[in-house]
Image (cartoon, helix red, strand yellow):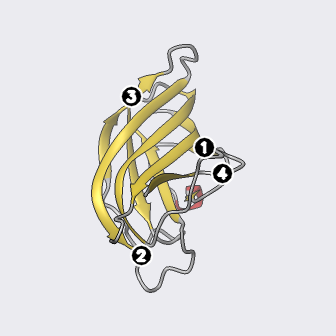
Amino acid sequence: MQGFAVNDADVTGITTSFVLGKAILIHTDTTADAKSSALPQSCYLSHIDIQLDATSGSPTKAAAILAWDSDGDDPMTGVSQGNPLWQGMTDTSLRNTSIALDTWVTAPTGQTTAGKCYLWIKVDAGTVTLKKARLHWAARRTI
């Protein structure tokens, strides 16, 4: 079984630092994307697709972290740094990247929001708005 979890709202004012108040909820939201599905409690994380809208400056790289909790204190992955951003082909204010994660995770006992995690992003320059984030996962099928 495989799928992806998504953000459910734009997040504005993302800058050059990870900011607690800019936590991005990643979960199933069929309004945001009809094909989204909840993150299993134990799964393989393949990659995360990120689409940003540059509202000021000219960002060329992004960094991201994932955590189990909205306080960012219970890590899910390490910091992924220096990911190159490419401009949209028709909308050049868009900046896109796909970050390889390549890791197996199991939700800790203390996770209180099953099927969800939180994402933080920072860029190397300027200010951006998160438009889309898709966290791709796969789960083992037991026979």
Residue type at tag 4: Asp
Q: Nearer the viewer, mark 2 or mark 3?
A: 2
Secondary structure of residue under mark 2? loop
Q: Which one is in front in this view, the residue at disc 1 or the one at disc 4?
A: 4
Label 1 with label 4: CB-CB less than 8 Å: no
Q: CA distance from mark 1 to mark 2?
A: 29 Å
**Which residue corresponds to mark 4?**
8
Compared with 78, 70 (above or below) is below
Question: In 3D space, how far apart are the residues under numbered discs 2 and 4 (Cα atoms)?
Answer: 21 Å
The numbered mark, 1 or 2, whose residue comes first in the sequence reads: 1
User: Residues at badges 4 and 3 in contact (C-beta under 8 Å)?
Assistant: no
Quick one: which residue is furthest to the bottom in this view? 109
Disc 3 marks which amino acid?
Answer: Thr
Who's the residue at 45% across and 41% down the image?
Answer: 49
Q: Quadrant of residue 33?
A: top right
Write down the residue under mark 2: 107
Residue 127, disc: none
Dot 3, how many residues are within 10 Å of its Cα: few (below 14), some (14-19), or many (20+)?
some
Q: Quadrant of the N terminus?
A: bottom left
* Total residue callouts: 4
Q: On the rendered image, what quadrant is the C terminus found in?
A: bottom left
Provide the residue designation for mark 1: 13
Residue 124 in sight in this render = no
Identity, as a three-letter code, of the amino acid under mark 2: Ala
Could you tell me how far apart the alpha carbons at marks 2 and 3 are, in whole angstroms? Answer: 32 Å
- The image shows residue 3 at horizontal and vertical percentages of 48, 52
Mark 4 → mark 3, Cα distance in angstroms: 25 Å
Residue 85 lies, in percent from the top left, at 39, 29
